[in-house]
Image (cartoon, rainbow, N blue to C red):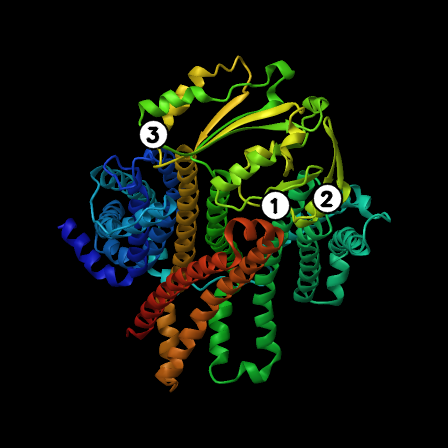
Amino acid sequence: MYFRLAFKNVKRSIKDYLIYIMTLTACISLFYAFLSITSRYYKPDIGAEFNLEVLGDGMLLVILLITMLLVFLVQYVNRFMIRNQQKEFAVQSIMGMEQSMIAGLFFIETLVMGLFSLVLGIALGVIFSQFITAMLLQIFQKPFAFSFMLFPDTVFLTISFFCTCFAIVGLFQIRTIRKIKIIDMLHANRKNEAFSTTHKWVEKVLKVNCILFFLMGIYSIRTLTYYLTEEFQTAIQIWVLISIVIPFVMVGLGIAEKKIRKSCSHVKYLLMVGLVGFAEMVTVSLLPVWKMYFALPMDKGAFNLYLAFIVWCLIFLVSVFFVVFSEGLLVLKDRSLRVKYKEENLFFFGQVLSKLGSNTLSMTLICLTLTLSISLFLLTPFLVEWAQGFLDKRVVYDIQIDSDYRAAENEELLPETDYEFLDSFFEEKHITLKDDCIFPTYFLKASDLQEQDAITAISLSDYNRLMKMCGYEKISLAENEFSTQWLSITPKSMMETFQTKHTRIVTDNGELTLSASEPKTEELGEVIYSGQNVVLILPDSQCDKLTVANSYRYIMTENPLSYADAEQLTDYFHEHVPMDGKEVYSVTTKTMERNDTSALIFIVQTGLIYSAIILFVICFTILSLQQLSDSGKYRYRFQVLRNMGVEENHIRRLVVKQLGIWFGVPVMVALLISSAFILFLFIGFSLQIKTYIGGWKLLQQVGTILLILFALLLCYFTSTWILFRKSISQR
């Protein structure tokens, strides 16, 4: 009988708890889709040059940690369901059913709904896993074709994880139901929201903010006054003064709070504090601009501290905004009679303020979480494209062998081998070489051996051989000239400064003049620079008497190396080149670098996207349920409007306006902050974007992500609107 009752409740509740089922199904499907790539049965066609074993443990750990957030979501939704069914629980209790049995029935009901979502989620997860596979193959630059496959170990892990979550949350909810009094159950739907305009929580935020601004003001005095000298430009000095003055203005507002609020309202005071905080955030956000365009010599620790302060300013401003927004609506309602009594605005203000006035803290947290989610979405293409672009520029050759002079204690320890012992390995493995270049780089002076930041040089003939290997045109030099090859990411200002100071250089073999030709920035790999941004190009005759700094062998193979051959090559190299406690030699293969780096990129990409989606789903589920939680009360209020003669189209418009405020305000604030974040990235990392990513490509990625976000928003808004209208339409 009890099972029949439970299933009867389930059939009746499916319509009312569509948001819960939709949310849980989405989370389960995403969990299965992302976890499927860790299955031992997962074998995509990525070629012999790649190995997916490095993905498994990392992906599994990331996904499980992120999915723990769903425990919170399941618990929250179950509380919502308990609240909606309290009247029914009371009727069952009055009819003689024990509360322990009522709790058990509710547990069975939620478990059945969870299992239904589990089956549906796994089915959808099979489809979504294809998109994850497509993303993986795109990282590894392989073609993609749809194929559907169910992975038994992933299914088992998904069922085990979510059933455990259902059981844990269900046991807590049983305990909760058993403690609820019958009288509270009967009057649950009659309780109104606690309307409050005091917002006591924000007072604590103000105190913390005052302390942090004081500390930042002291730190700015100690750190930034260095720039108030004549050697720095006026713009920098103005920025420094503002950065020091504004924090103490904020501290002054905090100390004089009581006195100020005697002459103005709480809203005006918060607005004043918010504007000062906004001014400081904008001022500190200009730091990357000064650092890039004015070469601001700020150390990494100070730079990161100011970035952390920007984050706090954002948190503080969002907190103040929702309090000001709530009380601002109340002021607008009370003082503007024209707005207050226009059409159904009086009812609209009552609806919104009854919720918003007591939920500014939750709206603040939701907005901050949405901001984090959107920022993670937007950050993903930035990091992924940067890492991929960097990989393409860093690993140019199929096999790259080099020595590190900085590890040598004296000239006798410098390598002298030409690495020809590898030829026997290539013959054994039938590896055909397309291009092969063995060459050294040189110190300008023998004494540079002891300098860790010494600039090295390459002969013109060796340089032209590398240019030919990479598909570039050869260059020419006069006997008394030298040229420069720069790392592509080097700022143009650094190149110009170097060439201005080094129009002439002195070597152990004579003096050379800088060539009139433009500096070279072709992609020749990063190792030849020896930790610097530049390597000098010298005529061959000049290199005869110079000290060898490093020796290299760069190889392009006819066909890509398999992952197994690359591993064996690395082991073979280390067997024939003893290190003797010093890492003087190193070997790098494109196969292993691409595989390991691509695996790491994919883990970061999936981790960011998965966490962003989960946070996004949690936020919109909470927003939806907050509107649907008082369905009985809303039904009565809107029925009163109908009895007063308000037309149905006006009621529909009221619903859209109410939901638009509840969904739209936190989303718009989050989008505004996220847009500022993207602008910050474009300004602070413009050179990296130009070199590794491309501005237009990044904007395309951002546009795609925003479309996905708006699609999710539309789904939740539409679902909430449908359920809300259904609820208020019931008699």
Q: Which residue is mark 2?
A: 499
Measured Cα–Cα span from mark 3 to mark 2: 43 Å
Mark 2 surroundings: few (<14), some (14-19) or many (≥20) residues within 10 A = some
Q: Which x, y percent locates residue 718?
A: 35, 68
Measured Cα–Cα span from mark 2 to mark 1: 12 Å
Mark 1 surroundings: few (<14), some (14-19) or many (≥20) residues within 10 A = some
Q: Is residue 179 visible?
A: no
- Classify mark 1: helix, strand or loop: loop
Identify the amino acid type marked 2: Gln
- Classify mark 3: helix, strand or loop: loop
Q: Is residue 107 left or right of residue 294?
A: left
Q: Which residue is mark 3?
A: 431
Q: Is residue 687 left or right of residue 63?
A: right
Which label sits on residue 616?
none
Mark closer to the chain start, 2 or 1? 2
Residue 53 position by quadrant: top left
Q: Which x, y percent locates residue 132?
A: 32, 48
Q: Which x, y percent locates residue 293?
A: 70, 53
Q: Residue furthest right?
A: 230
Q: What residue lies at 24% left-to-right and 46% top-to-bottom?
A: 104
Q: Nearer the viewer, residue 597 or 409?
A: 409
Is 297 located above or below residue 566 in the figure?
Answer: below
Q: Which residue is mark 1?
A: 520
Identify the amino acid type marked 3: Ile
Q: Is residue 399 visible?
A: yes
